[in-house]
């Protein structure tokens, strides 16, 4: 990666920096494990589970009665009372996590740089709960009783929109809706925006809040969710022989990305550098990965090629690792395809074993976890890996966190529709 290459855009009065180095200078988390980076990271490294009984609605009649709910979140800790009333939960999570990330980064957004600070977040389903609620209002009270804030509450791009409005970021603004790969795609796209010189800083990540009746019922109809209701903390068990489906989670992970020169100019602390981004499509099935995991393998290879590095020097992989029969098997096969003999030597973990699967938000929190793994030298465990499946025979860091020197790490996200995303992060030098 070159920090010094400059090229003038044709016809432009402004010199545009191309191929710039991009670093992570701020982190914000709202997760089932806690509010804030410190609380979440401490619980994650201790192997604690954030999964428990669903409290958002009556689960009578549902096959699944558990989820990774965010606990103790008060939107008025981050927003005015008026603002909080107008924001759907996923939007409030996004704004709250951004406030934490900006405070963590010490980034000041003002008239001198606002046009060069953008926002790009991922979200899979948006305001599903308000859709359910409003549908009931229309059916029981009539269309004139619908809130004028209904539409702004449901659309996914209101997360980056409200982040920009709240913090005054007037640069590139967009939203990604690529199912469970959305957060990772958003971070990768934000990385490329800075790299090509279209912004100097980006607020990016993933968010989701869909612990709702229709979402749980829908995934139950697909037989995708765990029904280990009597042991919620043990329900998410990636790569384990006794896994029986994923567990829905909710929350948000936000990263502040900056061009290296901008970060250095203001004396920012740097957690890690983003150096590679890959994406691919399976072109195979609506919900199932191809049997050989070849789409995921192409995605990981693309990320390595973008970073200009060999698979031989990757020290850690934060796996998609959903705790479903097919994902865990085919992701394992894909890793073996890409990493060859190295596959058996590189530590891999699925943090979804503790947070559940945040769908469009998963890539956001997992990118934060990957940056922290590099910065702190601790690899989070895959909990509940008591009896590894025969076909899942790699080093998944079972049950206990591991101290390790991690220079280069990969994080993966794969979504319905066969959409795949991988990021490469490395220690800043």
Image (cartoon, rainbow, N blue to C red):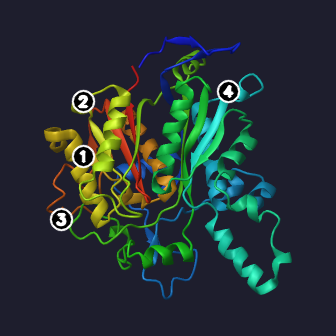
Mark 2 nearby-residue class (10 Å; few <14, some 14–19, many ≥20): some
Vertical arrangement, residue 194 with respect to residue 16, above or below: below
Instruction: Identify the mark nearer the N-term, 1 or 3.
Output: 1
x and y percent of residue 208 in the render? 55, 58
* Residue occupied by mark 3: 387
Residue 265: image x %, image y %?
Answer: 59, 15
Closest to the observer: 186 or 65? 186
Look at discs 1 and 2 and give the one toward the viewer. 1
Q: Which residue carries the number 4 mark?
A: 116
Which of discs 1 and 3 lies nearer the camera? The answer is 1
Mark earlier in primary sequence (4, 2): 4
Q: Earlier in the sequence, mark 3 or mark 4?
A: 4
Q: Which quarter of the rendering shows the C terminus?
A: top left
Residue at disc 1, secondary structure:
helix
The residue under label 1 is 335
User: Which numbered disc, 3 or 2, marks the residue closer to the eye?
Assistant: 2
Q: CA distance from mark 4 to mark 1?
A: 37 Å
**Quick one: label 3 or label 2, which is nearer the N terminus?**
2
* Gap between marks 3 and 2 measured at Cα: 29 Å
Q: CA distance from mark 3 to mark 4?
A: 50 Å
Question: So how many labels did they put on this image?
Answer: 4
Q: Tell me whether circle 1 and circle 2 mark residues in contact (CB < 8 Å).
A: no
Label 3: element kind:
loop
Q: Earlier in the sequence, mark 4 or mark 1?
A: 4
Residue 313 got which mark? 2
Q: CA distance from mark 1 to mark 3?
A: 20 Å
- Which corner quadrant of the image does residue 388 belong to? bottom left
């Amino acid at each position: 990666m070159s920090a010094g290459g400059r090229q003038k855009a044709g016809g432009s009065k402004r010199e545009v920096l191309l191929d710039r180095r991009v670093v992570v200078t701020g982190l914000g988390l709202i997760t089932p494990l806690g509010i804030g980076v410190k609380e979440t990271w401490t619980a994650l490294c201790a192997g604690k589970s954030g999964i428990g009984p669903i409290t958002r609605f009556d689960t009578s009649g549902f096959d699944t009665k558990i989820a990774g709910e965010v606990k103790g979140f008060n939107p008025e800790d981050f927003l005015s009372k008026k603002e909080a009333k107008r924001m759907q939960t996923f939007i409030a999570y996004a704004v709250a996590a951004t406030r934490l990330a900006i405070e963590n980064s010490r980034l000041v957004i003002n008239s001198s740089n606002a046009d060069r600070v953008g926002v790009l977040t991922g979200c899979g389903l948006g305001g599903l709960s308000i859709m359910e609620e409003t549908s009931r209002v229309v059916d029981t009270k009539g269309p004139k009783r619908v809130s004028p804030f209904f539409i702004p509450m449901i659309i996914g791009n209101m997360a980056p929109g409200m982040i920009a409005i709240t913090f005054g970021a007037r640069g590139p603004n967009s939203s990604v809706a690529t199912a469970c790969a959305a957060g990772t795609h958003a971070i990768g796209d934000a990385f490329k925006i800075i790299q090509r010189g279209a912004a100097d800083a980006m607020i990016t990540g993933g968010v989701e809040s869909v612990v709702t009746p229709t979402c749980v019922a829908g995934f139950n109809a697909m037989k995708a969710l765990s029904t280990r209701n009597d042991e919620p903390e043990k329900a998410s068990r990636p790569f384990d022989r006794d896994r029986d489906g994923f567990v829905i989670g909710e929350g948000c992970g936000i990263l502040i990305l900056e061009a290296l020169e901008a970060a250095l100019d203001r004396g920012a602390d740097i957690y890690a550098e983003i150096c590679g981004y890959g994406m691919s499509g399976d072109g195979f099935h609506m919900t199932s990965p191809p049997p050989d995991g070849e789409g995921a393998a192409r995605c990981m290879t693309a990320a390595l090629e973008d970073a200009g590095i060999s698979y031989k020097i990757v020290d850690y992989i934060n796996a998609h690792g959903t705790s479903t029969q097919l994902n865990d098997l085919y992701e394992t096969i894909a890793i073996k395809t890409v990493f060859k003999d190295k596959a058996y030597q590189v530590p891999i973990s699925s943090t979804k074993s503790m947070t559940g699967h945040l769908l469009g938000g998963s890539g956001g929190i997992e990118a934060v976890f990957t940056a922290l793994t590099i910065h702190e030298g601790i690899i989070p465990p895959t909990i509940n890996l008591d009896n590894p499946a025969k076909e899942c025979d790699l080093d998944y860091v079972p049950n206990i966190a591991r101290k390790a020197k991690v220079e280069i790490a990969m994080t993966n996200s794969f979504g319905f529709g066969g959409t795949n995303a991988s990021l490469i992060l490395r220690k800043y030098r």
